[in-house]
Structure formats: structure tokens, C-alpha cells
Image: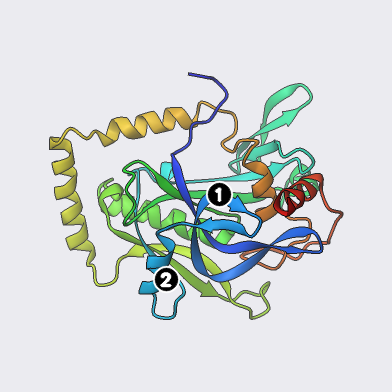
Amino acid sequence: MIKGLAITPPVIGRISIGKLVQKDHKWLPEKDDSFTLTTQVQNRDGWLLHPLHQPLVDQASNGKIRAIPVRLLFNSSELNLRAEYSAFDRSNGRPLCVGNGETARRSSKEGLEEVTCSGPDRCPFGQSVGCKLYGRLNVQVDGQQDALGTFIFRTTGYNSVRTLAARLKYFEALSGGLTHYLPLLLRLRAKTTTQSYRTPVYFVDLTLRDGDELAKVVAQAKVEAEQALEAGIDTVQLEAAAKQLLQNGQFEDTEEEVPQLLEEFYPDSETAGEGSKPATPTRTTRLTRQLGKANQA
């Protein structure tokens, strides 16, 4: 196996609660009040919608997707949701520093070194380079045909990361480590904060499906787990392999993905989104210009 390359869960689509819009030759994030399911293909108008998007729109009472029926690929909360403090070099898209609040891996001229991580609010280096909380949730959407494929939801919002982390840990504990077999709903919720100035801030939650009772769902999960084991499906080995593959690389995101991440989550001029603070506009980065030219071509 090639060393230094993190092998992540296979992705067949994206889930977002916003989109990129072009303003003054810049691509800036614009928050939304509904989910969007897209493929991994972009054209000059943005991300192409996934075939599963429209059926969910048709089922929604007001045409806006506020809940998505999902299951999880893994039982392990840490595999389903990976969250870190992350900073990127905005001139070339390479990761600069990734930490967990205790330790961090930081790129330097001497190579990769391990340093103390105190979080972006208390780290001078993090403040200087724009370090943020960055989470990735992988889920499987009802109706997909790929048994191992996932949709990825990326966020830099504290509300989403904290809520999802809590829910995953709770479901894992209550089900006896059988989260993979629970039918769940990815929900979009709203709240107001002092930073949002009474404007709704949207974040993502994970719950049981409407009408389901916890005891019945957990009982059914145990039955499904036993049936899977009898069929020869080994989820323990699956998770062991997934952990090993994720730890194979220094950083999870590839150089191919980072430019898009910078445009969506680390823009030059940020709009007030989930848990974000208004930032001072800066000059257009080389990555922004490249993305703009690519979409205009």
C-alpha cells in the first residue's frame, strides 16, 4: 500500500446546506435553509444535482429538503464523523496544521512535526493562518445502489459538529455499538445566536425517524446484526480496515480537493454563516482566480 495517502470512505455524492455563488469574479459561500444533494461533478453553474435529490424535494411538503433518511456505514462514531482543527495554505492549498485540541501535525520547512494544539482561539499560529474546526460526516442515503458508497457532509460549524458528535456517541452507546443498523434522519435545524443578530443559523442534527421508538429500533438493529453475521458480513473487520486506511496518510484531504474546500469554507470574504464571524475582506487568492477561470471556460 502507498504510504502517506489517507484512504477515506468512498464518496458517491455530497450533502450541503449552502452553495457557492460568483460575486465580483469571486466564488463566495451562500447559506441556505435546505439540504442539497449533488454529485462530485461541477460545471460553470455549480455542482450537478444527484439523482436522489429530486425525489426528496418531491416528498418535502414545501419543496425544501429539511430531512434525509440515512444509515451509517460504520458503528464507530469516530469513523462516521472525523472532526479536527485545520489550517490550510491559501496560496497553494496544502494543509499547514491539523490538530485535535491536544496535539497537532504541523508542516514546516523541516517536514512534519508534532506540536501542542490549544485550538484556534488560543493558538497564535492558528489565529494567524485562519485555523477552523472542520468536520466530515459520511452517511448512506436511502435509495442509493452502492453498498459501500457514502455521501459526505462537510462543515466548519461548531453547532453541527457538536450536535452530530453527541448524537453519534449516544446512538452508539444505546444500541450496544450497532449504529450501522439504525434507520436515522439527517435533519436541518435552526437557532439564533448573539453572533447571528436574530438571523436563523442552520445546523445539522441526527435523529431517529419520525414515528420510530428507540426500544423497537434497537431491537431490530440487533436482529439485523445477527443476520448480517450469519451471512458472513464482518463489520468488525470492515472498521479495522477503515481505521488503518485513514491512518495511512498524514492528512485526509488531497491537494485536488483542498481548493474547493478553501472556496467553500475558508473564503477571502466570509458571509455570516453557521457559527462564523464576519471577516475582513482580503485580496483574491490565486486559487479563487483559478476556480473562476475554470468555470468561465
Q: Using the image, tell me which numbered label, if any, was put on residue 41.
A: 1
Q: Where is residue 273 drawn, in percent x and y?
A: 65, 66
- Tell me which residue sits at (52%, 66%) in the image: 203
- Tell me which residue sits at (29%, 71%) in the image: 210
Q: Using the image, tell me which numbered label, if any, was put on residue 10.
A: none
Q: Where is residue 152 drawn, in percent x and y?
A: 48, 50
Lateral position of residue 271 relative to residue 228, left or right: right
What is the three-letter code of the residue carrying label 1? Val
Q: From the viewer's perspective, is residue 213 above or below residue 237?
A: below
Q: Using the image, tell me which numbered label, if any, was put on residue 57.
A: 2
Q: From the viewer's perspective, is residue 135 above or below residue 59?
A: above
- Tell me which residue sits at (48%, 71%) in the image: 189
At label 2, counting other C-alpha atoms closer than 10 Å, the crowd grade (few under 14, some 14-19, many 20 or more) is some
At label 1, counting other C-alpha atoms closer than 10 Å, the crowd grade (few under 14, some 14-19, many 20 or more) is few
Q: Is residue 263 visible?
A: yes
What is the three-letter code of the residue carrying label 2? Val
Lateral position of residue 59 relative to residue 127, left or right: left
Residue sitting farthest toward the right: 283
Nearer the camera: disc 1 or disc 2 = 1
Q: Where is residue 283 drawn, in percent x and y?
A: 87, 54
